[in-house]
Image (cartoon, helix red, strand yellow):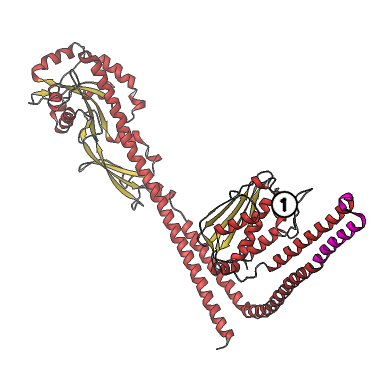
Amino acid sequence: MTSANVRERKISSLHVLVISLSLMMTIGAWLYSKQQVDLQIASRFEASKNRTIDLIVDRMSRYEDALWSGVAHVDTLGADVTAASWKHFASSLNIEEKYPGVNGIGLIQFVDRQNLQAYMTARESEERDFSIFPEHDLDFLLPITFIEPENINAAAVGLDVAHETNRRTGLLASRDSGGAQITGPIFLVQDSGHTPGFLFYTPFYSGAAPTSLSERRDRFAGVVYAPFVVRKLVEGLLSKDLRDVRFSLRDGEQLIYNEHDPDEPLHDDAPLFTDTVELDMYGRIWTVDVRTNQAFRAQNSFDQPNLILAGGLIIEILVISMLVMLTRSNQQAHRYAEELTKELRAKTDHLEKANAEIEQFVYVASHDLKTPVRGIGFLADVIEEDLEEIIGPLAKHPKIKSQIDMIRERVSRMNDLTKGIMEFSRVGHRDSDAGEHLSVSKLIEDCVADFEVDATTVQCSSDVEFIRYDSHNFRRVMENLIGNALKYHPNPRMARIEVSIEDLGEHLRVAVKDDGDGIPAEFHEKIFDVFQTLRVGSGPESTGIGLAIVKKAIQRNGFDIWLSSSNGHGAEFKFDWPKNQMQAEIELENVA
């Protein structure tokens, strides 16, 4: 099989892989979008359901507050509660506006049969037509004494709730617990529609508040109550038109309210979501069956997943078309690439060879320049000695002395330049000690000794004890950075230089910070160029090669150096350094 055929087969396999991955991404995006939409819809159902449940609980809590205010009214007036005072109290509640859904608020008094005559006498003194009904053989009565508004609840005035089990059981439970209580389902006598309802009780007692069951039974005086028709209660909560869910209520096994009738507007035969919630409602367990309706379905029908799927398939078609075109031009591109690669490889080899020759030439030239420079220095000494023999001590001839010193200064500067150029050209070459480990503490000690400063001038904190890779060039970098910090400090003897070496796992992070005059922002890039110096006036001489050597040594290992500084606030140089040969090769490949 030829190499071209092998390559064609590999390309074909790659195309299949690309198409398969693209199709998987499309299906994945469709499934994810569908899942997110389903979660959003489910969340909206939960919000609607919880809002409905909260409305029921909150409304019943508000009704309870109204009933307890009635208890407070009775406690305040005691035996002086009359039909007039009760009517005034009920009017102050503004029931129709503040408590929609409640039929009214009334007072039921506990009457022992032995005290029935006194109770009836009190009612006759109110000059109203009052009678207790129906008759029963219990030894106590629980007649509805007052209820407001009386015009719509007239049928309930005088009703003895002790005659019927649900009414009586709920009331006695309220008496014994001392808390609010509702009855099981009943039909209100004042409800002409004969629909399910219930009574809501809060008890009151004679004398001080009872603290035990026996005291509550002994001092029980009656209850403040409110009659409810469940249908009106729900209508007072939230109109169906403003809800996108429907619900039903059950008290035990008995259905007391239902919005799931198929004849209901917006009824959904297959609701998107359903849930049941049990509410502990003042001594009774109400089961709320919540279901979505057609309005919910219409508001939560999203085509986004299908659009994503359709768009993905269109992209698939475009990808396949593109791959077909790529396949047709593949062989031509490979032939061109092979020719270009050969040409580039030849040029690269040529450039690398030329670069090596240039570096070697620079090194040799700089080295050879040392001899004539030393000769010039020697001649300056000879000239000075000859002149002193002819004209006497040069101290008497300051102009000649200054010119001889200027020659020596230029010779010294020339030596520094040639030394710097030689060092710059050799950066990146591994010397004999390149594999040795460099002690960080020894490096700092050597710098302190070489620059003749106090040991406290250079402070070092390091996560590592040794530099294990390219220690020779690392020493070059650190000596140049610390030397520059001291050279350009306004008072080198008072300088403070902080060196930190942090182990970042894959490489080292090195920082050299000083408290000198700082470097203006416009020079942050220029100072790393060869022969660039910031010397002004009578400042220290500089070849402008030190920081260029630093940058070249760091970049040869695949990293870079950066500067943080502002005029008058010191300078901080930071760079990364490889921990081993493998890391250096990886960084160089990344740079390439």
Q: Is residue 102 visible?
A: no
The quarter of the picture where the C terminus appears is bottom right
Residue at figure coordinates x 27%, y 24% from the top left: 68
In the displayed structure, would residue 298 be above or below residue 546?
above
Residue at figure coordinates x 73%, y 74% from the top left: 357
Instruction: Judge from the rendering whether residue 296 lies leftward or rightward of residue 395; answer left or right.
Output: left
**Farthest right residue?**
390
In the displayed structure, would residue 356 be above or below residue 261?
below
Q: Is residue 181 visible?
A: yes
Q: Nearer the viewer, residue 268 or 84?
A: 84
How far across and down, in percent of the image, does residue 242 sit?
A: 40, 39
Q: Nearer the viewer, residue 397 or 85?
A: 397
In the displayed structure, would residue 568 be above or below residue 139?
below
Span shown in magenta: 373-397
Instruction: Judge from the rendering whether residue 138 lies leftward or rightward of residue 229; answer left or right.
Output: left
How far across and down, in percent of the image, does residue 567 sit?
A: 69, 45
In the image, residue 376 lies in the stretch drawn in magenta: yes
Q: Nearer the viewer, residue 336 or 518?
A: 518
How far across and down, in percent of the image, does residue 575 sit?
A: 60, 57
Q: Give residue 420's quadrant in the image.
A: bottom right
Instruction: Categorize mark 1 by other alpha carbons within 10 Å: few (<14), some (14-19), many (20+).
Output: few
Instruction: Judge from the rendering whether residue 62 lies leftward or rightward of residue 219; answer left or right.
Output: right
**Farthest bottom residue?**
1
**Overall secondary structure of the magenta stretch?**
helix
In the image, residue 77 lies in the stretch drawn in magenta: no
Q: Secondary structure at mark 1?
A: helix
Q: Give residue 67's quadrant in the image.
A: top left
Residue at figure coordinates x 76%, y 54% from the top left: 541
Q: Give residue 579's quadrant in the image.
A: bottom right
**Residue occupied by mark 1:** 523
The quarter of the picture where the N terminus appears is bottom right
Q: Nearer the viewer, residue 551 or 28?
A: 551
